[in-house]
Image (cartoon, rainbow, N blue to C red):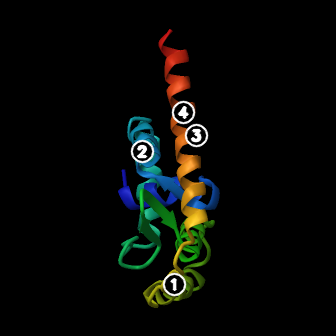
C-alpha cells in the first residue's frame, strides 16, 4: 500500500479536506486491511507521479490536530486518477503537474480563534459519535 496516495485519498473524502489524526489512522487501518485490491490500486496511482512527496511538495499541510489536503494536492490526485491518455500527451501532463507541484506553497493565513473553536466542537462531536457507535456494536 502506498502511504502517500492513501493519505491523499482519505483527506479528499473529508469535508474541507481536513481530518484529525484519530480519523486518519482509523481510515488507514481499514484500507490497509481491506485486501490486495487497495494495495494494487495505490501502487498504480503512485506510478503516475513517481517522485511524489506529499509534504515537501505542499500537497498536504499539517495543522493542529490533523492534516489537510491543499488545492494542489487535490489536483495531483485528480491527475493520478485520470484515465490514461496517449503517451506524448501524458508526458506533457506529467511535466505540467510536476512543475506546478515544484512551486513553493503559499503561506496559509492565520486562523481565527472562532475557527479553532468550531473545529474543536466538530472533533468532540465526531469522537462522541464514534463512542456511541462503538457502544452500539459492542452490545
> Answer yes or no: do the residues labelled 4 and 3 have beta carbons within 8 Å?
yes
Neighbor class of circle 2 (other Cα within 10 Å; few <14, some 14-19, many 20+) is few
Label 2 vs 4, first from the N-terminus: 2
The local secondary structure at tag 3 comes to helix
Please state the horizontal and vertical placement of residue 136, each as a whole percent of the image: 55, 16
Whole-number angstrom distance, CA of label 3 to CA of label 2: 13 Å
Which residue lies most toward the top here?
A: 139
* Residue in view at x 44 percent, y 78 percent: 58
Label 2 vs 1, first from the N-terminus: 2
Residue 46 lies left or right of residue 136; in this view the side is left
Q: Which residue is mark 1?
A: 91
Q: Which residue is mark 3?
A: 125
86 versus 115 height, above or below = below
Whole-number angstrom distance, CA of label 2 to CA of label 4: 13 Å
The local secondary structure at tag 1 comes to helix
120 vs 102, nearest the viewer: 120
Whole-number angstrom distance, CA of label 2 to CA of label 1: 38 Å
Amino acid at each position: 500500500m502506498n502511504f502517500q496516495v492513501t493519505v491523499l485519498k482519505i483527506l479528499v473524502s473529508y469535508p474541507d479536506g481536513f481530518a484529525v489524526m484519530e480519523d486518519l489512522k482509523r481510515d488507514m487501518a481499514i484500507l490497509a486491511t481491506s485486501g490486495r485490491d487497495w494495495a494494487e490500486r495505490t501502487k498504480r496511482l503512485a506510478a503516475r507521479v513517481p517522485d511524489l512527496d506529499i509534504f515537501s511538495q505542499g500537497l498536504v499541510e499539517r495543522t493542529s490536530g490533523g492534516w489537510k489536503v491543499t488545492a494542489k494536492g487535490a489536483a495531483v490526485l485528480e491527475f493520478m486518477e485520470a484515465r490514461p491518455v496517449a503517451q506524448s500527451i501524458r508526458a506533457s501532463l506529467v511535466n505540467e503537474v510536476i512543475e506546478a507541484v515544484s512551486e513553493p506553497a503559499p503561506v496559509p493565513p492565520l486562523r481565527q480563534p472562532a475557527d479553532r473553536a468550531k473545529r474543536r466542537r466538530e472533533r468532540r462531536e465526531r469522537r462522541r459519535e464514534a463512542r456511541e457507535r462503538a457502544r452500539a456494536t459492542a452490545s
